[in-house]
Amino acid sequence: MSVDADQRFQRCAAFVLEREGWGTFTDDPRDPGGPTRWGITLKALQARRGESCTAADVERLSEDAALWIYRDDYWDAVGGDDLPAGVDLIVFDAAVNQGAARAARFLQTAAGVEADGVVGPQTLAAVQAANADSLIDRIKTERVTAYWETPGWSSFGHGWANRLAGCVGQAHRWADE
């Protein structure tokens, strides 16, 4: 089955929206992300808007606005349109959950290129030359290692690990279509 880039973004976004609780607002003091809705943190919203925001601004964030941020600040930032099916999901999910530059570095490390956090021609060439299933597994390893080093692992690690396991399974299914 051939899926174009926009369709791949839509299905990856739907996957991530579900993992992000379909817009449930959270503000757990143990969460290193702080106030969050749709996976968009207060810090990310402020960066997007270029102005100071409040937790209430995050709480009012619409799904449409979240999708716009997903597309511009996460999908496009990691070169989602140019990634193979399955690889796009695990990298995009990492971008929303762990930061776009960090997700790019996960991809680059897994692909064996310099991890500078910017997905460019060298990264994309290495990704295209790699086996998608192997790349997904290497990215998974990078993400797990980063989770272990993240403040909040003791409180949220089980949920993060479950999220990643579901993401890896779906990524492999899409890679094998």
Image (cartoon, grey):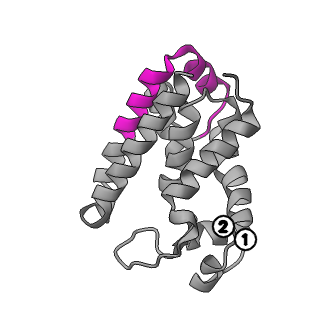
Q: Position of residue 58 (x, y in %)?
A: 61, 77
The residue at the point 39 percent across, 29 percent down is 137
In front of the other: 57 or 48:
57
Quadrant placement of the N terminus: top right
Secondary element at image label 2: helix
Question: In the picture provided, is 115 more to the left or to the right than 153?
Answer: right
Q: In this view, does 41 lie above or below 55?
A: above
Instruction: State which region is magenta.
Output: 118-142
Nearest to the observer: residue 61 or residue 31: 61
User: Toward which corner of the image does residue 81 lie, by quadrant?
Assistant: top right
Q: What residue type is labelled 1?
A: Gly
Q: Kindly identify the residue that appears in the image at 59 percent across and 26 percent down.
A: 123
For residue 57: magenta?
A: no
Q: Is residue 59 above or below residue 68?
A: below
Q: Which amino acid does label 2 sit on?
A: Ala
Q: Do the residues labelled 2 and 1 touch (CB within 8 Å)?
A: yes
- What numbered label is drawn on residue 50? 1
Question: Most prominent secondary structure in the magenta stretch?
Answer: helix
Tell me which corner region of the image, top left, top right, bottom left or bottom right, holds residue 160: bottom left
Graded by Cα atoms within 10 Å as few (under 14), some (14 to 19) or many (20 or more), the crowding at tag 2 reads few
Furthest toward the top, the residue is 129
Residue 47: numbered disc: 2
Q: Name the residue: 45% across, 23% down.
A: 133
Magenta stretch contains residue 125? yes
Residue 116 position in % (x across, y down): 54, 38
Q: Where is residue 90 in the image (x, y as percent from the top left)?
A: 50, 39
Q: Is residue 157 visible?
A: yes
Side of 80 where 25 appears, left or right? left
